[in-house]
Amino acid sequence: MSILPLTISGMTKSYGAVRALRGVGLTVGPGECLALVGENGAGKSTLMRILAGEERPDSGVLVFNGRPTAVTSPRHAQELGICLIHQELQLVPPLSVVDNIFLGREETRLGVLKSGRQHKQATRILEELGLRIDVTEPVSSLSIAEQQLVEIAKGLLRNAELVIMDEPTAALAPPEVERLFSVIRVLIKNGKGVIYISHRIDEISEVASRVVVLRDGSVVGELPANVSGREVVKLMVGRDVGEFYPRTRQPPGGTALEVRDLTAPGISDITFDLRYGEILGVGGLVGAGQRELAAAIYGRTRPSSGEIRIHGTSFVSLSPLAAIVHGLTLVPEDRRHEGLNMKASIAENVTLPVVHRHDPWGVLKLRDLAALTGDLMERFRIKANSSAQSITELSGGNQQKVVIARAMITQPAILILLEPTRGVDVGAKFEIYELLNRLTHEGKAVLMISSDLPELLGMSDRIVVLYKGRIVSTLNRAEATREKLTVLATGQRLDAHP
Amino acid sequence: MNRTSAARFFRLYGMILVLIVLVAALRILQPRALGMANVLNLARQISITALVSAGQTLVILAAQIDLSVGSVLGLAGVVAAGVLRDTDSAAMAVAAGLGVGAACGFANGIVVAKGKVASFIVTLATLGVANGVILLYTGARPIAVQNDDFMYLGEGKWLGVPVPIILAAIVYVALWFILSRTRFGRYNYAIGGNELATRLAGVPVDRYKIYIFMSAGALAGLTGIVLTARLGSGVPTLGIGFELVSITAVVLGGTSLFGGEGRIWGTLVGAAITGVITNGLSILGVGAYYQPVVTGIVILVAVLADRWLRAT
């Protein structure tokens, strides 16, 4: 018996003094995809965790197909048929696809796995989702997009009726996003319910039929999905943000960074110039060499040939330390793993690259460091109680601003940004864009690597497109379109698609 | 006191409460335990554990582990005794002991940092090598020490306070300052908190890892010197078990084994707890074979209690 339609009403949840949910209500029916949007901290995750049995609400009712039910544990949620796909996938990388899919509900006889049966079943479910792979391969050999499908297959094997996806497209390239959308359409056609959480407003109308907007723990609006993105953002933020990409362009200055025939692990023959006052976007499918390009320039890997020139000074290879000394800094992609020390305070994170300049006689001038942090927090609009506050207490957007502030503390002339707004809410996104604007107006050169197409189109002055580690095209702002980027990123030629 | 501030209180002072409870229990079970003679003896014992655990704290804060501190301590002890026998110079002996310790730490550090090998394996290898070298150097026989200047480090008193206690106090004050107020300290925490992010921020991580292991080695060397001076003999088996004792003290002191979180004075409390337990069991006449069993259980209970208190 189906659990749909599912109705939530009057849901409240507080953490200490923080009221995460203040009486939220919504409904999702069979064969329907509901989009749930809201800024970080609006209560989306709390609501989803309640549905998945990871949290208990303070009050409120969950009604599954007319029967009020409390979800008591993640296991209970699974038994009910609720499948939550976390942003950080819950797979065991070294195990095979089939072992992952059956993890926890292996089919056995006398404790011996029925491998053949499992193999067949896993293959069939994945094929329904349009993924033809050898299910004995380890999950770690799959792309993020494929891993996501494995996660969905895992849910389907458990007879999921309601699939909840938390920002599934954050790490996907455009064609992979398309594939995910077709999978969602298949789910809907088969009568499943889908709750789709995303920060990418423009995607919503592609799959969802309704949009529910959360703000500060309450539902502030329910709109048809074909409403304009700007309307949705206005509801989310609570004010009109105007033009979403606030890029004001200017004639660029001299050449800041020249990369010539650079070949390194994952990239070949990369040549481009980056000028002061310019944002050069780097696009392409996930894994087309963007990350490797940044790694090679910043000295995380060793180029096998080619040359990097920073303001005319030539290098065969750099190290992070040497790059910083010569005025080039990198804002890493994954702030939790590569960017921040989550066990430290804001000040300790922000000032890390410069503490050696503030310790005469070997003793840190803590007051100077705190003042320096305070200035940067103001300049970068980092919202926190004090510079001594723990980094874990900040929202994703503010954490990202801390990473950028730390990069700027060494006063670099050239900045490499990887996915500068991933997992950041709309308001903070806008502030980061304004920040990039300001930096380029101050004459900084910015290399922006992003898999967010609208962002790439909205913020870049020029865009280079990578395919299999090579630059296939460089587009000016005026000629770049979503379609052209998608065609180029998949290795096709533009003239074949007039 | 509300729940969060209670949790905070226990996070900071939970182990001090455990220590107070243990001391109170000992006082009730055996009133003579807190007599002057035993307290001084106990403090001296604790100061030895505290010295070797101080270095381990730096290493664990950097999300590494040093299994070689015990063997390095032993090697430094017998080398100091050997140098003393050959030169009769206390200064030379101390320099040799510290030098051996720092050199072992340097070896650990350079292989961990440049060779990219897990510190667990590297220091396990050093443990084995150092144990072997001890036997080769001594022929498995103790080396007698007869030098009053040297013995002063273990047996002497300054203003009525035993010298090992003074040394431990100096080391702890210095490390507290270094960890909270210097670049070295900042980098030590940062490496343990997120090594990759620290490296990408332009910090010379490899060099500081080597410094950290060298500090741990030198402190193990110092402990070996003090113990040798106290026993009046370079004993080949001197360091056995100290790696586990030091790790226990650090963990009891609230430092995360995953690195990046912890305080040096926590380790002092941890060392005191292990000392009080061992000393208390002896005084209460618990048989030698039962002592490690009771110690193990008490430590487990203490850590579980700590975890439980933090979770509420």
Image (tube, rainbow, N blue to C red):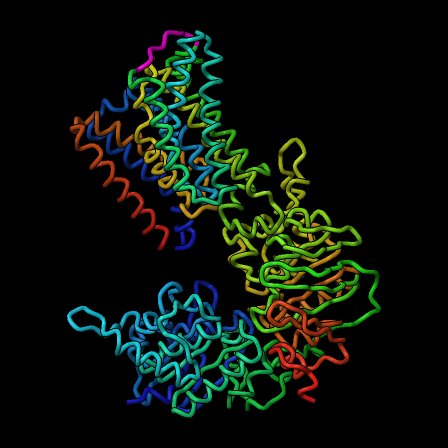
For residue A362, above or below residue A302: above
Q: Position of residue A135 (x, y in %)?
A: 36, 74
Residue B119, visible in the rendered structure: yes
The residue drawn where x is 17% and y is 26% is B285
Where are the magenta residues, as a range?
Answer: B142-149
Image-quadrant location for residue A161: bottom left
Is B176 on the left-hand or right-hand side of B154? right
Q: Quadrant of the N terminus of chain A?
A: bottom left
Q: Position of residue B299 (x, y in %)?
A: 28, 40
For residue B271, above or below residue A274: above
Image-quadrant location for residue B146: top left
Residue B269, visible in the rendered structure: no
Q: Position of residue A132 (x, y in %)?
A: 42, 80
Q: Position of residue A29 (x, y in %)?
A: 40, 90
Q: Tell me if residue B144 is in the magenta stretch.
A: yes
For residue A355, above or below residue A328: above
Q: Quadrant of the C terminus of chain A?
A: bottom right
Is B274 on the left-hand or right-hand side of A385? left
Frontmost residue, B149 versus B98: B98
Frontmost residue, B38 versus B243: B243
